[in-house]
Structures are given as C-alpha cells and as structure tokens.
C-alpha cells in the first residue's frame, strides 16, 4: 500500500463523505433493516453522522485521533439502538490507537481500525460469520493492506455475503432461520464507511 499520509483534515473529509453516502443510502438501509430489525437503521445512522459533521465543523480537531474520538463520542450520544455504541466504539478505539500523532500512515489507520473492530467484537460478543457489521469490517480492514479501493470492494463483498447467513447476534438473531436471505444492514452501513474512505483517498 502506498505511504499516504493522513492528517486531521483527511479524517474530517472521511466523516463528511460517510455522512453524505449514508444520507443517500438511508432509505435502503432502513429497508434492509425492516424484515430483520427495527426498521430504523438508516434514519439512526443518517442522524448520527449528520451530528458528527456538525460537531467537526464547529470545532475541528487538531489530530486524526482526536477527530475519530470526537466522531465516536457523537455517534454514541446521537444514534439510537445498538448502532451508536458499536460505531462509536469502532471510531473511538481507533482514535485512541493513533494517540496524539498529527498524521498517521495508511498502515497505522489499518491497525487502528483493527483495534476498533476487536473492541466492537468484544462489546457485541460477535465474530465474523454471525451476520453483523463485522462481516464487512473484517475483510475491509484486511484488504486495507492492499489499497483503499480493495478495502471498499472487500467490505461490500462481505456485506453481500451476509444474505445466506443465519443471524447469531443482534435483533435479527431472534428470527432464527427467517433471518436467512436478508442482507445485514449493519454490514451494509460498514461497507459504506469503506466506500467513503476510498472516495476521499483518491
């Protein structure tokens, strides 16, 4: 992977791009959530990431770590359901891994997000194959070692791969075998984060 240097402004652009793509895809996320969840994932994510952008614009953080910690904190406070704590934990843990560095490398970004995913797995008690956001996050982070575009493609493939899975965690797991045949909305929104990352890295 090329040695792209990523500063606080890059991470603000990432969160802004993520908010834009989630806004565009909010109806689809809610549609995916309707048969296996509370039919609110799109609206919740839309509201949360809009709040993130507002907060970052009002008080731009000085470092990559501070940017993701602020974004994570805002998601936890503004997104309903399980998504706020899970996405908030992902970003806050990654931000903490960056420390006070004014810039991070692409490899440091990958390592930070990997730490975030470990924290999400611990919080949710889930693993890849359980039909959760991890099914998009884990392949996306692995592919970050190659390129941002590879990560976007791998996470999207991971989200699509949740369709035949039996949900073992989250609200969808209450449906048992009826969860089979539906794409996981959390994996889908996770893939959108990687799509936004690839977009701002061009």
Image: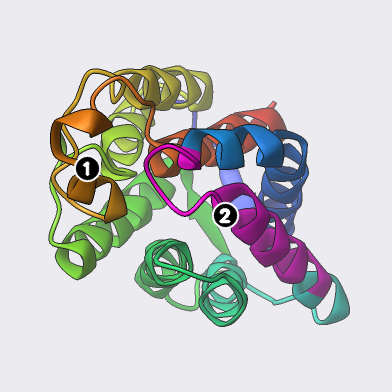
Dominant secondary-structure state across the stretch colored magenta: helix
N-terminal-most mark, 1 or 2? 2
Q: Quadrant of residue 186?
A: top left
Q: In front here: 33 or 120?
A: 33
Q: Which residue is mark 2?
A: 40
| Rendered image: mark on residue 86 | none
Left or right side of 74 for 163 = left
Q: x and y percent of residue 71 in the render?
A: 60, 70
Q: Quadrant of residue 102?
A: bottom right
Q: Nearer the viewer, mark 1 or mark 2?
A: 1
Q: x and y percent of residue 21 in the render?
A: 71, 37
Q: Secondary structure at mark 1?
A: helix
Quarter that holds the N terminus: top left
| Rendered image: mark on residue 175 | 1
Q: x and y percent of residue 32 in the render?
A: 50, 34
Q: Residue at x 28, y 43 (%)?
A: 132
Q: Quadrant of residue 177?
A: top left
Contact between marks 1 and 2 (CB within 8 A): the answer is no
* Residue 52 colored in magenta in the image: yes
Q: Secondary structure at mark 2?
A: loop
Q: Residue at x 18, y 51 (%)?
A: 169
Local packing at callout 2 (Cα closer than 10 Å; few below 14, some 14-19, many 20+) is: some
Tell me where the magenta segment starts and ends, as one range: 33-54
């Amino acid at each position: 992977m090329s040695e792209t240097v990523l500063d606080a402004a890059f991470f603000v652009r990432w969160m802004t791009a993520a908010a834009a793509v989630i806004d565009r895809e909010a109806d689809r996320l809610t549609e995916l959530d309707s048969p296996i969840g509370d039919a609110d994932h799109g609206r919740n994510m839309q509201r949360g990431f809009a709040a993130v952008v507002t907060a970052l614009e009002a008080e731009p953080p000085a470092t990559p770590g501070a940017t993701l910690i602020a974004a994570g904190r805002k998601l936890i406070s503004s997104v309903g359901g399980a998504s706020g704590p899970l996405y908030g934990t992902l970003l806050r843990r990654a931000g903490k891994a960056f420390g006070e560095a004014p810039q991070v490398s692409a490899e440091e970004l990958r390592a930070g997000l990997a730490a975030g995913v470990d924290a999400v797995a611990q919080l949710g008690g889930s693993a890849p194959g359980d039909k959760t956001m991890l099914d998009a996050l884990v392949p996306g982070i692995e592919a970050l070692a190659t390129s941002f575009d590879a990560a976007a493609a791998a996470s999207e493939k991971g989200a699509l791969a949740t369709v035949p899975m039996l949900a073992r965690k989250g609200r969808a797991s209450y449906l048992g075998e009826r969860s089979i045949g539906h794409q996981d909305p959390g994996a889908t929104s996770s893939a959108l984060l990687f799509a936004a990352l690839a977009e701002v890295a061009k």
